[in-house]
Image: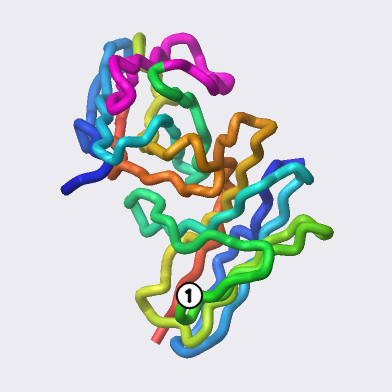
């Protein structure tokens, strides 16, 4: 049973296109996250949602729009893709009530912009 | 100054060696601490939480020094399978409990 699942695993597309990445968790967690890991391997938080509400929005271009239809899902839509968007995007979830609880990550979506 | 700093390495060690990584954090209000492991092209996975009194899990020992604001990870009897990037992670209620990741320390264990 996959705890945090992301689709697609690989995404290759052209500059200027619009694409979405989906994430679902079956752990009953309240909080979900999107991270970006670029070629330098630094893992950086983009967004965090708690019970469908946005609680963290780091400095991310507004071409990136997260959407949480319910607390088990957090999707990421990206408009007008740019070369610099090429990276691995990880979804994660955690039980927000307990700050000493770790996050569980999805397998990642490898986005390549041509 | 970065919120979480780690020596990027790589640390190249022979099998059976003991290796230690340190990590420093800038926010004195940080509350929870973790070590994650990330294999090449894979997702980060929790290795262990770090408790104030220090904790051990098999060959892995984690220590926390709040006064000096650093965390350490000691790996004894290194195995080839320990080769990975080790990420130091810190949370703070002040920042909405978000996890802040260090850039990672690369470990390569060789036979």
* Residue at 24% across, 22% down: A13
Looking at the picture, does residue A51 appear above or below residue B85? Answer: above
Instruction: Kindly identify which residue carries mark 1.
Output: B57
* Residue B109, image quadrant: bottom left
- From the top left corner, tell me how far across and down residue B3 is, in percent: 70, 42
> Quick one: quadrant of the N terminus of chain B?
top right
- Considering every residue shown, the one lying at the far left of the view is A1
B93 and B27: which is toward the camera: B93
The answer to whether any part of residue A114 appears in the image is no
The residue marked by circle 1 belongs to what chain? B
Image label count: 1
- Is residue B100 among what the camera can see? yes
Looking at the image, residue A63 lies above or below residue B40? above
Q: Quadrant of residue B74?
A: bottom right
Residue occupying the point 29% across, 28% down: A72
Q: In the picture, residue B73 is in which quadrant?
A: bottom right
Q: Is B50 covered by the magenta stretch?
A: no
From the top left corner, tell me how far across and down residue B21 is, in percent: 62, 68
């Amino acid at each position: 049973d996959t705890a945090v699942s992301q689709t697609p695993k690989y995404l290759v597309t052209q500059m200027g296109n619009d694409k979405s990445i989906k994430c679902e968790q079956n752990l009953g967690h309240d909080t979900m996250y999107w991270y970006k890991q670029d070629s330098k391997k630094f893992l950086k938080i983009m967004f965090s949602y708690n019970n469908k509400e946005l609680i963290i929005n780091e400095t991310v271009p507004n071409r990136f729009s997260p959407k949480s239809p319910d607390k088990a899902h957090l999707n990421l839509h990206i408009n007008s893709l740019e070369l610099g968007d090429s990276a691995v995007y990880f979804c994660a979830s955690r039980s927000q009530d307990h700050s000493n609880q770790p996050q569980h990550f999805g397998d990642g979506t490898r986005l390549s912009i041509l | 100054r970065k919120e979480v700093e780690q020596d990027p390495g790589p640390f190249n060690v022979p099998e059976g060696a003991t290796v230690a990584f340190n990590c420093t954090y800038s926010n004195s209000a940080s509350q929870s601490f973790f070590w994650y492991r990330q294999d090449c092209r894979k997702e980060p996975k929790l290795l262990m939480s770090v408790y104030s009194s220090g904790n051990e899990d098999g060959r892995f020992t984690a220590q926390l020094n709040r006064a000096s604001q650093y965390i350490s990870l000691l790996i004894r009897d290194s195995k080839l399978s320990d080769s990975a990037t080790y990420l130091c992670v810190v949370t703070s209620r002040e920042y909405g409990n978000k996890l802040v990741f260090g850039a990672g320390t690369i470990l390569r264990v060789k036979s």
